[in-house]
Image (cartoon, rainbow, N blue to C red):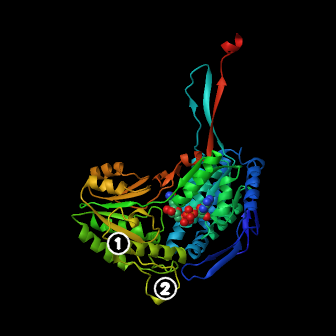
């Protein structure tokens, strides 16, 4: 990888601290470059602000902007294999997952292009001799700050609607996985996005991300990441009176009722927590199983978890790939060790694999813990690794009380054959997304948001574009006569 970042449409060396990125499957360094500095942020934001006006992007008709967005989507789809290889090397994820993320990003740009062409303004009922209407306008420059767990998809989920709305975007990708965001910048430029409308500025959260949030010309920030970081960004935004969208962490319940199709529920629970090696905001990390089927279900869950194939993301047979870095793996291991000291029982996993072929990678075995109550730290804190806790419940009221007894409210899975019960429980759980007899499925046309400490604001769907616009009301006087007061 060259020592270049993408500042205001130009590839050049960053003026910030050196960044080193490693392949977590081997520990080997795969890229070294200089990250962005606070001065680079300022240059990118000012150039973005100018580009919005001077390139005509702000006033381009929706179908004209849509044409560029569609071309970006096509370019991403054509580069899916290259994106997948880069992202697997950067994050350790399986090639199947990173290819799916690339295609999801392509789909996001295409969907956004199509949705943009259907956007409408409203003529509202007037209360006098005037016509009233609403108009929506871009903020100017939007800051997009993304995490490492699915960078290309998160980048697209912010950049596509923000650009569609007529803004420039200053993207601050994650320190641990910056390479694919730089590749996205190249593809956007090749697809004809006017120069200056996108900058990609890798570097640490502080000072680089912080400088994006605080820059006076940044009119909105869309952030995906941890709840602690989200709070800090929310505080900085409050100082500027700036809107933010925050997509934050989770500790999502997956619920198994006695009448659930056991095979489907097992597959769903395993996929919900162990796919992406548990490094997913929506990971189903608290598994609530009805007490009448608890022992049998947990026994089979453990057998299946032990049989999952752990290996490098480049091996097509791998189900559980390494974690993103060795530091993160060690953090996950420390949380499991602390849970055990607090009384948890390790039902499987709870260690790094002993396979000598995996010794250099940031691996951690799929882990199931039992023997703790829902108020234990391991049930309250987001682990962001392949760690599930199994918890029994007695009835619906007990379940809802336990499932909602958490700071988070991101997602929930319900496994039952009784659709009335599924509906009742779905409506009672505090979560932005509920899956019934499925899990971790996504559609770009369906809004996504977190409740409680899992977030603020909504992404995706047609309204996602409007979230990057300011609303304005326009009154058109229709009366021939002067206003009565003015007429005296
Ligand atoms: P993180 O909060 O550490 O970092 C996210 C991004 O914010 C990175 O680019 C980081 O450099 C930047 N950042 C850090 N401090 C900052 C500051 N003070 N100002 C501005 N930017 C700053 O999160 P992470 O470890 O990269 O990602 C994992 C977290 O993301 C988990 O908590 C996960 O649940 C969450 N996540 C949420 C969603 C969602 O849609 N709700 C999706 C994916 C990940």
Q: Residue beneath label 1, please?
A: 369
Tag 1, which secondary structure? strand
Task: Give x and y (percent) for residue 98.
Answer: 54, 70
- Residue 92 appears in the figure: no
Dot 2: element = helix
Quarter holding the N terminus is: bottom right
Q: Residue at x 58, y 78 (%)?
A: 23
Outermost residue, front direction?
341
Q: Residues within 10 Å of mark 2 (few under 14, many from 20)?
A: some
Image quadrant of residue 325? bottom right
Residue at the image point whose x is 73% and y is 70% from the top:
4
Q: Name the image quarter holding residue 138.
A: top right
Where is residue 160? Give x, y as percent. Answer: 61, 55
Please indicate whether residue 135 sits to the left or right of residue 307 in the image.
right
Q: Nearer the viewer, residue 87 or 26?
A: 26
In the image, ligand 1 is in what quadrant? bottom right
x and y percentages locating residue 255 in the rendered image: 32, 60
Furthest toward the bottom, the residue is 356
User: Which image quadrant for residue 288?
Assistant: bottom left
Residue 466's spot in the image, x, y percent?
58, 45
Q: CB under 8 Å between callouts 1 and 2?
A: no
**Residue 282 seen in the current view:** yes
Q: For the residue with label 1, is its CB less than 8 Å from the closest atom of ligand 1?
A: no
Quadrant (top left/top right/bottom left/bottom right) for the C terminus? top right
Q: Give 410 or 408, whichever is nearer the viewer.
A: 408
Name the residue carrying label 2: 358
What number is the disc on residue 425?
none
Of the numbered discs 1 and 2, the one sitting upstream in the chain is 2
């Amino acid at each position: 990888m060259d020592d270049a970042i993408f500042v205001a449409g130009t590839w050049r060396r960053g003026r910030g601290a050196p960044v080193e990125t490693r392949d977590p499957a081997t520990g080997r360094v795969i890229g070294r470059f200089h990250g962005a500095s606070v001065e680079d942020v300022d240059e990118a934001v000012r150039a973005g602000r100018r580009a919005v006006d001077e390139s005509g992007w702000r006033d381009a008709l929706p179908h004209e902007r849509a044409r560029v967005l569609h071309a970006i989507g096509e370019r991403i789809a054509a580069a899916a294999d290259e994106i997948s290889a880069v992202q697997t090397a950067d994050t350790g994820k399986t090639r199947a997952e990173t290819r799916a993320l690339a295609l999801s990003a392509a789909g996001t740009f295409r969907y956004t292009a199509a949705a943009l062409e259907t956007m409408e303004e409203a003529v509202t009922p007037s209360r006098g001799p005037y016509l009233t209407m609403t108009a929506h306008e871009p903020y100017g420059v939007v800051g997009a700050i993304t995490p490492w767990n699915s960078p290309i998809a998160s980048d697209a989920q912010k950049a596509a609607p923000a650009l569609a709305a007529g803004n420039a975007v200053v993207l601050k990708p994650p320190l641990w996985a910056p390479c694919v965001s730089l590749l996205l910048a190249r593809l956007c430029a090749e697809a004809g996005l006017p120069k200056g409308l996108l900058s990609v500025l890798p570097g640490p959260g502080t000072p680089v991300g912080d400088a994006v949030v605080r820059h006076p010309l940044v009119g909105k920030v869309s952030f995906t990441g941890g709840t602690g970081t989200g709070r800090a960004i929310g505080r900085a935004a409050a100082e500027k009176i700036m809107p933010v969208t925050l997509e934050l962490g989770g500790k999502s319940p997956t619920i198994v009722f006695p009448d659930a199709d056991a095979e489907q529920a097992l597959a769903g629970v395993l996929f919900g927590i162990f796919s992406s090696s548990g490094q997913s905001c929506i990971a189903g990390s608290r598994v609530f199983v009805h007490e009448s089927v608890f022992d049998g279900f947990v026994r089979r869950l453990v057998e299946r978890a032990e049989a999952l194939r752990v290996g490098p993301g480049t091996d097509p047979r791998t189900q559980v790939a390494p974690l993103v870095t060795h530091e993160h793996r060690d953090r996950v291991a420390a949380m499991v060790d602390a849970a055990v000291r607090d009384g948890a029982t390790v039902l499987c996993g709870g260690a790094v694999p002993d396979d000598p072929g995996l010794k250099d990678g940031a691996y951690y075995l799929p882990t199931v813990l039992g023997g703790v109550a829902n108020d234990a730290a391991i049930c309250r804190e987001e682990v962001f690794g392949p760690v599930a806790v199994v918890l029994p419940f007695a009835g619906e009221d007990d379940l809802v009380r336990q499932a909602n007894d958490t700071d988070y409210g991101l997602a929930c899975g319900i496994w039952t054959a009784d659709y009335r019960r599924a509906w009742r429980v779905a409506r009672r759980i505090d979560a932005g997304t509920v899956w019934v007899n499925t899990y971790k499925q996504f559609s770009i046309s369906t809004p996504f948001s977190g409740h409680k400490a899992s977030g603020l604001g909504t992404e995706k769907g047609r309204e996602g574009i409007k979230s990057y616009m300011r609303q304005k009301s326009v009154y058109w006087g229709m009366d021939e006569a002067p206003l009565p007061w003015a007429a005296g």
